[in-house]
Amino acid sequence: MSGFSFSKLKQAKPSMRRRLFLYMGALAALLLVTLFAVLLLLGQLKSPWEELAKSLTFRMEAFQSDMESLWRNVSVMGLHLSENMTAILEKQTTDLSKLDGDADAVERLEEAMLEPLCQYVRQADCSGAFVVLNTSLVSADSSFSGLYVQRSNAAHTTSGLLLYRGMADIGRRHDVMPHRKWAQEFDLSEFPGFAEHLKTASVPVERDCRTTSLLTLPDTSERAILLTVPMLGGDGTAYGLCGFSVNQAYFSSHHAQPSGVSRLACVLSDSAAGLDISKGLLAYPANGFCFVPDELLTEKPLQEGLTSYTGAELSFVGLSQPFMAASGDIEPHALTVLIPKRDYGRLLLKSKLEIGGLLILLMFFGVVCCLFYTRRYFTPILEDIDHVTAAGGEAGNPFFEELLPLSNKLRVHERTITDLETERQDLRGQMEQAEANAKRLAQRRKSEIDPEEYQLFLSAYQKLEPEARTVIDAMVDGISVQVLAEQLGKKMSTVYSYRRDIYEKVGIQGENKLQQLRVRVSLMRREQTEYGGSPAPSNGENAGQAVNR
């Protein structure tokens, strides 16, 4: 038997330890899973691709809002320019075809148009403004007279103006110096889309505003997008085109994007397969720059709606979406926001490190909680197991020694409960003895009272005012006159007067009046208790029976 007991003891101790450590590990795992789920629900743990997509989407929204504002302003100013230039033209001539080859007439017309055109350049969100007239001084089919005025320095709105197309003498007279690549007339073959728009111009004019694709101005390296608005007479005659240009220098200077990312590029380009940087305008953050080579970038989709743009040497990651710059555009442009792929990799690494650090922090927190839990709850149990004795069931102890401390505590509790039960029985006996003594005392007092006097007392007591009953209760309970006077808010003399009146009303005379009052009130309370709170019997016979009972 002893050999069997010791073998069980040797097996029980490690079994208990394994169970305790298993519970501790389960608690740690549950704690980690709970914290991880809470962080996911609160949005603290997100994929790095999702965070980057959200950041680029925010910057795309800002860029789109800026572009909508730009082209809305240019379109509205273009409509006003069309109205003004049409009015000037109709004032100068009723038949524009009569101006063909007439240099003097064309000079007078351009003279009238130049100053208002310069005012529009200064007021509009643009780098230049132009007017193309459906007339020519030469016989070439693609040559058209007109004016093109642009800023000499697109980065500064207060800079002077240059005459890119038009009669040079007119510009000099108005302090608008000819551009270094000046020409007298427009060659529409060098301005894609102008000739087609001039042929198809129709009313309403506000729905026929169009933007060109990005073009390089003839004989220059200056790239610009032009907004064209037709000039139509009241009878629908097409007098020509007018509008504004937005070149790269003006675009990058006046439409820098507010962003916390320093290496960011925002591109307004043609909507075609791939991203052709050579056919787009670029804007950068207000305090940053991102070099994007003038080449065609191939697109490849990534996670979370992101797109990879790959060039010959550099690669980028970003978002792209279509954009209608003007109401009459046949095909939309494209808005694109880019960051270098190297920065993209750094952001992913940073996000992964943050998530890893957070998980390590969660694990540390879980381990600390488990250690605290072990030190606070498990260690005492293990100490009890280590300090158990080899006493077996013959001494009244449990068979497995791990349960010995718990058994000892239970026995202590049982002894305590037995002692409390004994004390309760003793207190119950004392209470029964006190009740018996109280009954005997009441019977003795009943025999000392005349039934008729007691009945008169009850009748008189029922007629007393509540305040008088309060005074009687206080007298019976032993409350002093001073305390009673403070409780009632009366003078002590008034309370003494109450007491004399009460003795007279309830028929108590002679010596020891207070003692007689206490005996009668005690008997009355006793009877009310026996009758369940109901008043004592009202007739003399029953009252006498109550007294003699």
Image: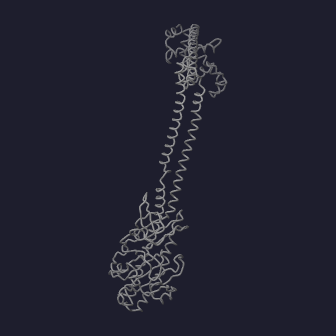
Residue 25 x %, y %? 52, 38
Q: Quadrant of residue 280?
A: bottom left
Q: Nearer the viewer, residue 369 or 229?
A: 369
Q: Quadrant of residue 298?
A: bottom left
Q: Is residue 281 above or below residue 45?
A: below
Q: How is the image coloured?
A: one colour
Q: Is residue 38 above or below residue 115?
A: above
Asked whether residue 305 is in view, the answer is yes
Residue 68 x %, y %? 44, 68
Q: Nearer the viewer, residue 70 or 413?
A: 413
Asked whether residue 72 is in view, the answer is no
Residue 474 x %, y %? 61, 21
- At 52% from the left edge and 24% from the top edge, which residue is drawn? 8
Answer left or right for 522 relative to 248: right
Q: Is residue 499 above or below residue 24?
A: above
Q: Nearer the viewer, residue 484 or 158?
A: 158
Q: Nearer the viewer, residue 58 or 133?
A: 58
Pick out the residue farthest to the front: 3
Q: Is residue 266 above or below residue 95?
A: above
The tally of labels here is 0
Q: Quadrant of residue 451?
A: top right
Residue 236 x %, y %? 33, 80
- At 50% from the left edge and 72% from the top edge, which residue is drawn? 252
